[in-house]
Each structure stands twice: as structure tokens, then as C-alpha cells.
Image (cartoon, rainbow, N blue to C red):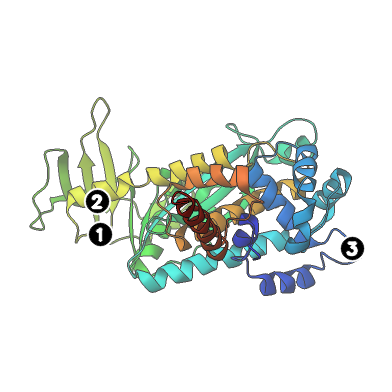
Amino acid sequence: MYSKSRLSSLLEFIPWETFTELTEQFKTDRYTKKFDTRSHLISHIAGQLMGCRSLRELQTAYNSQSHEHYHLRSSDIKRSTLAEANQKRDAGVFESLCKVMLGTVHRKLRKQIKEQLYLLDSTSITLSGLGYDDWTLSNKTQRTQGIKCHILYAREAQAPVYAHVTAANVNDIEDAKRLIIENGATYVFDKGYYDYNWWWKITQSGAYFVSRFKYNAGLIDHQPYENGHKNSPNILCDETVRLKYKHLGHSRRLNQYQNPLRKVTVRREGKSPLVLVTNDFSKSADQIAELYKTRWEIELFFKWLKQNLKIKKFWGQSENAVRIQLFTALITYLLVHMFHQSQKMTMSLKLFVALLSTSLFQRPETEYALAKRKRKKREQYSLLQGSLFT
């Protein structure tokens, strides 16, 4: 009986009808004779999961399973063809597919849980040297040269719901202003998103945020805050404050946040106290501290991506090739996450990826085949037992 390979099972979570519409929209299969956008996507997903370090490795590993290509509606690949596709095929089709899949995860999550907890951060990827300097040198900062990946991570789903790739010199807060703020949700972020007017936008949208005050923040009207919760000894101070200045820095823009804010000071072993800010007046100070502590989970997500998928060493030096590899890496993560969730697996995501890397093209035995094999063994054992009496 026919059994699907693990790669085929993963690919079922891709909305292929939408993907076909995207290829027509971006005209990525125009003048294509053999290596179409579908094959391009599948080969990249396979390369991510097999841990290929170069196009030559990807060609060898993928073509070694040529007997599986028919069922994948794909074909053998050539290194030169793949390199040309990475150079010329519009990365927008892969970015758009990634956004569609992120939206699917997001909608499913919002149906299950109304009050979401989102972690917001970005990670920089260094790209310098021959080939990279042509398009990253002009946008480099004092800290890095390359690109930046901005992620909104849903803690309950343990998956990103927003992703955007920009130049390294784009400030985190500038990208955050693109987000649609959800009523009732809580956003946790660090000082890279320090903008009082954006905080006001979150408050006006009926959402909450937890972040950190800068050491030189101008604050007035300090008043002790008590809401009936008993706090632990680690909470040094819980008070309401107001922002002192009516304008934002040297820009002279009007500071729209004139409402009270909550300042929570948390003790840290061997370090200076953590000064948190939030517009949530319903939770205890300990709960606010715990919310900010969850921010490290997005750092672990970035670490997982860089350790388990190929987003540090790229298969091409052009901007288009890098963007294709980044978005196909995110698509791969979403596929693995969806499959892992659907099967209700007990093994960790890391171990599951390790399993896929060695058995991506294997066909797990079907229940029918397994039952048939067990029945045959029982018949053999019955024959052997009968021979004992002869």
C-alpha cells in the first residue's frame, strides 16, 4: 500500500492553490521550461532540513532521492540552475507565501485564545565580504553589516506570526510601527522599541505592553501603587508615574502619552535593579516581572533557527538569494511546527528536526502494512507450534 514520505507529509501544510496564484502574480514561472517555482521551493525546504552547506551538497543530496521526485511533482536539480534561480527569481513570491502561512497560524491562535501574549524583537545577520558588500556596505551600522529580521512571536503557539526582513540600519521601532495592534493583547519588548507615541498607540488600541524604562527617563508624580496583590521580596518598588516632557527629544514632536504609567522595580542578583514600565494596572508586580522574563523565549527562538536551519551560511551572495533562503527557512520552521502540532508528538522540535534530517524521504510504514506483517508472523509461529506435536 502506498505511503507518503515525511517530506510529502510536511508539504501538505503548504496552501498550494494560493502558491500557484502567487507564482502567477509575480510571474516567476514565465519562460521557465523545467525548474519551476514549486521545485525551487521544495528543494530549498529539503536543503534546510538536510542541513546542506552549499548548492553542491544540496544538488547531491536531493538528486540521490530522484525516485521520490515524481510524487513531489519535482525533478532533479542542477547547481547552476539553482544558482541562477536564486539570483533571478523574485524573492517576493516566497515572502508572500511566508506571510500567508504566518497569517494562518495567527488566525488559528486567535480563535483559541483571545488575550494573546506577543514577544517582539529582531535579530541581525552579518553579511560582509565578496558579493555581500555590493548591497550591504551602504546600510551597515557601527555594530553590524548585513540584514535584520524582525519577528513577532506568539508565546502560546511558540511560533512567529509576523516576519519582515530589512537592512541592518533600520531601527526596530520603525518596523514595529507597521504592526496592527490587537485589542486585549500584551506586547513584551526591550528598549529598542522606546517610543512614547507608539506606546500610546498600543494603549489607545486597548492593548497592553511591558518594557523597560531608560535610566535617564524623565518621570514625575511618583505615587505608590497598591492593587491588593501581595508581592514577593524581589519587588523593590511598584508605583505610578507620568512622563515629564511634553516633546520627544530634539525632534520637538509632541509627546502624546500624558496618561499615568506603572513603574515596577525588580531586584536582580549581582546586577542593578530592573526598571520595568507597563500600562497594565490589573496584574501584580510579580506577574509584570514574569511577563518581561518571557521575552527571553524569542531569543531562544532566534538561537534555535540559527542552530537548526541555514540562515547563517547562505547558498548565494546576492540580496535576492539571501532573502529567498531566509523566507524558505521560516516556511520550513512553520511546516515543521504545524506537523509537530498536528501529530501531537512528545519529542521536542529539535529532536524532530534531527529525525527529519536523516529520514526526510523515508516512507513510514502504514497501519495496513504493519498489521499484515504481524499477521504473517503469527501464522508462522502457529505453524512452528503445530510441528512440536508431530
Q: Is mark 2 on a helix, strand or loop?
A: helix
Query: Are the two marked residues, 3 and 1, in contact with CB atoms closer than 8 angstroms?
Result: no
Mark toward the viewer: 2 or 3: 3
Residue shown at the point (55%, 37%) measured from the top left: 307
Whichever of labels 2 and 3 marks the residue nearer the N terminus, that label is 3
CA neighbours of label 1 inside 10 A, class few (<14), some (14 to 19), many (20+):
some
Image coordinates for residue 293, horizontal then vertical, percent: 31, 44
- Residue 167 at least partly seen: no
Whichever of labels 3 and 1 marks the residue nearer the N terminus, that label is 3
- The amino acid type, in three-letter code, at marker 1 is Asp
Name the residue that disc number 2 marks. 288
- Quadrant where the N terminus lies? bottom right
Q: What element carries label 3?
A: loop
Q: What element carries label 1?
A: loop
Asked if 29 appears above or below 358 in the picture, the reply is: below
Is 123 positioned to the left or the right of 312 in the image?
left
Image coordinates for residue 302, horizontal then vertical, percent: 50, 43
- Residue 287 at least partly seen: yes
Image coordinates for residue 357, horizontal then vertical, percent: 61, 43
Asked if 8 appears above or below 321 in the picture, the reply is: below
CA neighbours of label 3 inside 10 A, class few (<14), some (14 to 19), many (20+):
few
Name the residue that disc number 3 marks. 32
- The amino acid type, in three-letter code, at marker 2 is Ile
Q: Which mark is residue 280?
A: 1
Q: Nearer the viewer, residue 390 or 359?
A: 390
CA neighbours of label 2 inside 10 A, class few (<14), some (14 to 19), many (20+):
many
